[in-house]
Image (cartoon, rainbow, N blue to C red):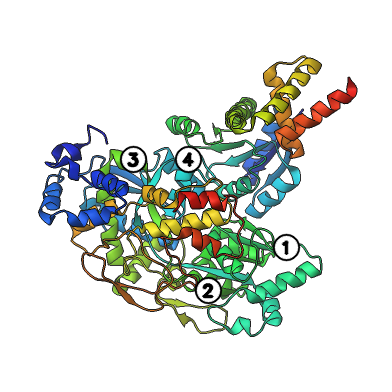
């Protein structure tokens, strides 16, 4: 802890600062949340009152990739939420996720729209030079789909008509097509996703692997920037892809492909994007960080109200942001989804979730899930303490500070089990009960964050580079 | 030996300028690509020594994936940009981004820039390999040292040069350093 930390100087009880809690919590095997609950509200509020000196850094630039799910940053900027909390914000449109990561790493951007796995990958140095990166705010849930070419769709229907009628759709029919190709000595098919550590990569792999397809050997998986997906599907460079909207809908509307499954169906209410900053920045500007998170929470709250969605669409469709026709942006925001041309859109009200179901809370268990997938597919090559790594990257402590100032309900736990709720439920481990959405995986598997090794062992298809025994030793 | 360069640019006109500049500077431009799918195919097919890409190209994400897949045979990447922010360029280098950010594409500057990028990359690779080497077993290190000794004697070169030669051969043949070293020792015993 730095001596010149202004927060520390102003607090009358230095041992009760946020970071102090965190340290004590980790050392004692308790969560920071658990300890926070033990502190009388008066002490916490006094600390807040002493903190009202405003952000350390007022001029901030946040990076976005022009996708509909950058919306919360854009809305907080355009609707004055950042301003309300003392920030002069600017939004910078970036061309690639690699650029976003590099610019956040070197401080050219204060924070950015990131794929949920990115802060973890940046911290661990997966695909990049390691740079400690944190997130205290989750930007949205769901929003992706898997689409295949018409040719492949027809082959799948022929190979297994019964499997193709099931919902959610499994990859069983695809497996049969792949097996037939192998027998005929044909080269593997090519599928695309958007970044090595993207949610899309883990989702398409999860979906394929559950039907016994090895995504590293039975198909070729490549990265293609989202706006190039449809053209590549049409020109038969690729056979299918996993991408966010509007790039599934675009292929369906143009009669080029069929959407097989959305990521909502693969894992109900899965985390998608987060707001990431580098750790050095977070430590240097804690009040700026908190102000940003408060503004983002408010913006997400506003956006999640159905009556405001039309305005959200208008804002983000602009040239300086997503730069797409309003009706195209609207489709993914209105809670319906069309899988095939000529079919009526099916209701999917939770396709884009921005605030409800504690969507903005940075669950450490979500980080742990991503780490299990990075291990599963050989992206992480050395054994690591999964829980400790997740705790250093996902920072619910910072979120709670922001949420308390806003007076909103907040979870008092950092972890939740995934895959046990098929319908709505209520999170009672919270300052006030929070209504939650379903969290099932389509294959019925359950992720208990207390048992990541058992979870990994449960996958039949995996290509790990880490030794399971060494990993187990670090994750008892 | 001419370095083999792959140029990734979505702007074909600029790409042509860049190719001319690189060729005039003595590099072999093995391929020019302007789409993500081509990057994947070309990196596999032509195995370039250096990849030159526009920092603001969306194809950077594709390139990054290709680099992750082929991380056993890493290659330097040169990024160019119109951005005049010198501080940003310096920081990008300090952060160890395996790249050299170029401002402008004049023929005179290209050679120096690519050379610096390659040198930096080799230095960085060298550091990484030193670390790996430190972690390798003593036996392996002894084998590599013996091979280095043979090379130094045969080729009258410095230890550094001998090591670089070993590493390059290993990368070219897609073999482990120790395998190459073992081969050299075996060959040497046949020839003496």
Q: Which residue is mark 1?
A: A188
Q: CA distance from mark 3 to mark 2?
A: 40 Å
Q: CA distance from mark 3 to mark 1?
A: 44 Å
Give me the residue at 80% from left, 27% from top. Answer: B184
Disc with the residue nearer the chain's start (2 vs 1): 1
Q: Residue at x 64, y 75 (%)?
A: A172
Point out the image quarter for the N terminus of chain A. Answer: top left
| SS category of the residue bearing label 2 | loop
Numbered disc 3: secondary structure: helix
The chain identifier of the residue carrying mark 3 reads A
Q: Percent from the top left, x then y, of residue A378?
A: 58, 52
Res. B74 image quadrant: top right
Q: Compute the Cα span from label 1 to label 4.
A: 33 Å
Is residue A196 toward the left or the right of residue B49 in the image?
A: left
Q: Which mark is residue A443?
A: 2
Q: Residue A123's spot in the image, x, y percent?
A: 44, 44
- Dots 3, 1 in contact, CB < 8 A: no
For the residues labelled 2 and 1, say whether their Cβ atoms are less than 8 Å apart.
no
Q: Chain of mark 2?
A: A
Which of the two marks, 2 or 1, is nearer to us in this view?
A: 2
| Residue under label 3 | A281
Q: Which residue is mark 4?
A: A130
């Amino acid at each position: 802890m730095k001596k010149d930390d202004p927060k520390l100087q102003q607090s009358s009880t230095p041992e009760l600062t946020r970071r102090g809690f965190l340290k004590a919590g980790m050392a004692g095997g308790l969560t920071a949340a658990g300890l926070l609950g033990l502190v009388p509200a008066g002490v916490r509020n006094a600390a807040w009152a002493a903190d009202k000196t405003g952000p350390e850094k007022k001029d901030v630039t946040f990076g976005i990739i022009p996708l509909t799910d950058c919306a919360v940053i854009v809305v907080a900027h355009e609707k004055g939420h950042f301003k309300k909390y003392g920030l002069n914000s600017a939004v910078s449109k970036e061309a690639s996720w690699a650029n976003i990561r590099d610019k956040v790493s070197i401080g050219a951007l204060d924070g950015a729209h990131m794929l949920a796995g990115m802060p973890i990958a940046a911290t661990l140095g997966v695909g990049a030079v390691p740079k400690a990166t944190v997130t205290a705010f989750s930007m949205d849930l769901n929003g992706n789909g898997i689409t295949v070419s018409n040719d492949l769709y027809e082959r799948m229907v022929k190979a297994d008509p019964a499997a193709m009628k099931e919902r959610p759709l499994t990859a069983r029919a695809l497996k049969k097509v792949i097996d037939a190709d192998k027998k005929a000595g044909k080269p593997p098919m090519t599928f695309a996703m958007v970044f090595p550590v993207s949610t899309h990569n883990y989702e398409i792999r999860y979906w394929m692997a559950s039907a016994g397809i090895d995504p590293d050997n039975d198909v070729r998986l490549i990265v293609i920037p989202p706006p190039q997906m449809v053209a590549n599907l049409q020109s038969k460079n690729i056979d299918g892809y996993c991408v966010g909207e509007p790039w599934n809908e675009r292929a369906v509307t143009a009669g080029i492909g069929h959407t097989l499954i959305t990521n909502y169906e693969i894992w109900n209410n899965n985390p998608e994007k987060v707001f990431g900053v580098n750790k050095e920045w977070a430590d240097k500007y804690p009040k700026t960080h908190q102000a940003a998170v408060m503004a983002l929470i408010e913006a997400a709250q506003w956006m999640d109200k159905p009556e405001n969605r039309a305005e959200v669409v208008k804002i983000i469709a602009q040239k300086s942001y997503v730069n797409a026709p309003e009706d195209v942006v609207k489709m993914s925001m209105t809670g319906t989804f069309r899988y095939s041309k000529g079919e009526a859109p099916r209701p999917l009200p939770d396709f884009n979730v921005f605030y409800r179901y504690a969507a903005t809370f940075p669950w450490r268990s979500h980080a742990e899930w991503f780490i299990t997938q990075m291990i599963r597919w050989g992206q992480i090559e050395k054994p690591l303490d999964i829980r400790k790594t997740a705790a250093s990257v996902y920072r619910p402590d910072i979120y709670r500070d922001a949420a308390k100032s806003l007076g909103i309900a907040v979870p008092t736990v950092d972890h939740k089990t995934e895959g046990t709720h098929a319908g709505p439920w209520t999170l009672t481990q919270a300052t006030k009960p929070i209504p939650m959405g379903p969290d099932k995986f389509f294959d019925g598997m359950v992720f208990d964050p207390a048992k990541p090794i058992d979870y990994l062992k449960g996958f039949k298809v995996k290509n790990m580079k880490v030794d399971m025994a060494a990993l187990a030793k670090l994750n008892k | 030996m001419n370095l083999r360069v792959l140029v990734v640019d979505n702007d074909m006109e600029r790409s042509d300028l860049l190719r001319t500049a690189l060729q005039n500077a003595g590099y072999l431009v093995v391929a020019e690509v302007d789409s993500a799918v081509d990057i994947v195919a070309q990196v596999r097919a032509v195995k370039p020594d250096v990849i030159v890409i526009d920092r603001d190209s969306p194809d950077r994400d594709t390139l990054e994936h290709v680099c992750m897949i082929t991380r056993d045979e890493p290659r330097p990447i040169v990024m160019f940009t119109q951005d005049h922010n010198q501080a940003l360029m310096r920081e990008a280098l300090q952060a160890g981004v395996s790249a050299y950010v170029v401002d402008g594409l004049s023929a005179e500057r290209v050679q120096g820039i690519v050379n610096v990028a390659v040198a930096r990359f080799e230095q960085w690779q060298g550091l990484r390999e030193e670390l790996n080497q430190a972690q390798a077993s003593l036996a392996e290190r002894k084998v590599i040292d013996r091979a280095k000794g043979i090379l130094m004697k045969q080729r009258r070169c410095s230890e550094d040069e001998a090591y670089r030669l070993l590493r390059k051969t290993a990368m070219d043949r897609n073999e482990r350093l120790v395998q190459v070293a073992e081969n050299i020792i075996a060959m040497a015993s046949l020839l003496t």
